[in-house]
Image: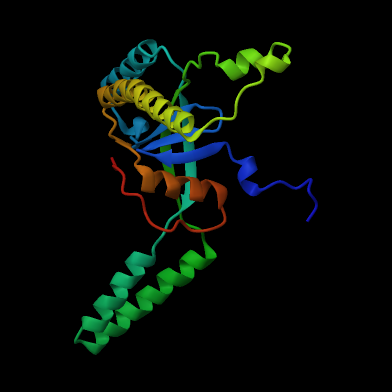
Amino acid sequence: MSKSFGNTQDLVDIKEIREGTVLMKNGGLRQIIMVGGVNFALKSDTEQNLITSAYQNFLNGIDFPLQIVVHSRKVNIEKYLDGLARYSAEEVSPLLQNQAEEYREFIRGFVQKNAIMEKTFLVIVPFYPIVAPTKEMVSGAMPTLPFMTAKKPDKQAGAKARETAEANFSENLQQLKQRVSQVVEGLFSMGLEAVILNDEQLVELFYNFYNPETVEKENINLPQR
């Protein structure tokens, strides 16, 4: 393979996922909130006005950027089909057993020919840590003289750097959580339910993003309204 083709991971800005947080390669943090939908058109005029007013207040109270994403994905019905298979196997009536099998095959065939899609509403809350200039950054902007050459880092220095990085992560995560809490409260004020995705759900979500032609491995249980 040509060296001009990098690793696939080089094209993804995600460094790792931990503690319900997406760590970006540029040092930024993200938490993702999944929001249940509401049929605005079926609300009365009074209810629509209340929701609109709450949304305006929500936006006016936010002093940091947000990203709102509507994601469509194929619905996983394997568990539903497995349930029908168990029902059919336990049914004592041959007639009902046959009907259950026919229905199961009908559903399977219908889904194979017609993709059943589900819309998911996401709110991405970012946090950009303020990085203080390091010795390496300062020395990189200045001509290096022989006596200024840095020594090779020892194990103790490496452990200290990891300890500092972990402390910075914890501090930044707390600030991000404060933002997320504010957003969740704003969503509640509009009558919307919200779930902050955990590590497993985040991995599943990004798997769906980068594999749009496949059915998700498992369903993410989310609030429905």
Q: Quadrant of the N terminus?
A: bottom right
Can see residue 182?
Answer: yes
Q: Residue 123: x and y, percent?
A: 41, 30
Residue 218 in which image quadrant? bottom left
Residue 53, picture quadrant? top left
Direction from residue 78 to residue 188 in the image, left or right: left
Q: Considering depth in this image, is 6 or 208 the residue closer to the camera? A: 6
Residue 210 position, x and y percent, is 56, 48
Pick the front one: 19 or 200: 19
Q: Seen in the image, is 109 located left or right of residue 84? A: right
In this view, the residue farthest toward the front is 147
74 to 70, vertically: above or below: below
Please tell me which residue is depicted at 48% across the width and 32% down the height of the picture.
Answer: 158
- Number of numbered tags placed on the structure image: 0
- Residue 124 shows in the view: no
Q: How is the image coloured?
A: rainbow
In the image, 221 versus 171, the foreground residue is 171
66 or 15: nearer the viewer: 15
Residue furthest bottom as drawn: 94
Residue appearing at x 80%, y 52% in the figure = 2
Indicate whether 212 appears above or below 106.
Answer: above
Question: How far across and how far down the image is residue 76, in percent?
Answer: 41, 59
Instruction: Indicate the quadrant where residue 216 lies.
Output: bottom left
Q: Considering only vertical position in the picture, is 210 above or below 188?
A: below
Q: Residue 58: x and y, percent?
A: 34, 16
Residue 82 is left or right of residue 152, and the answer is left
- Give the residue at x 28% y 40%: 225
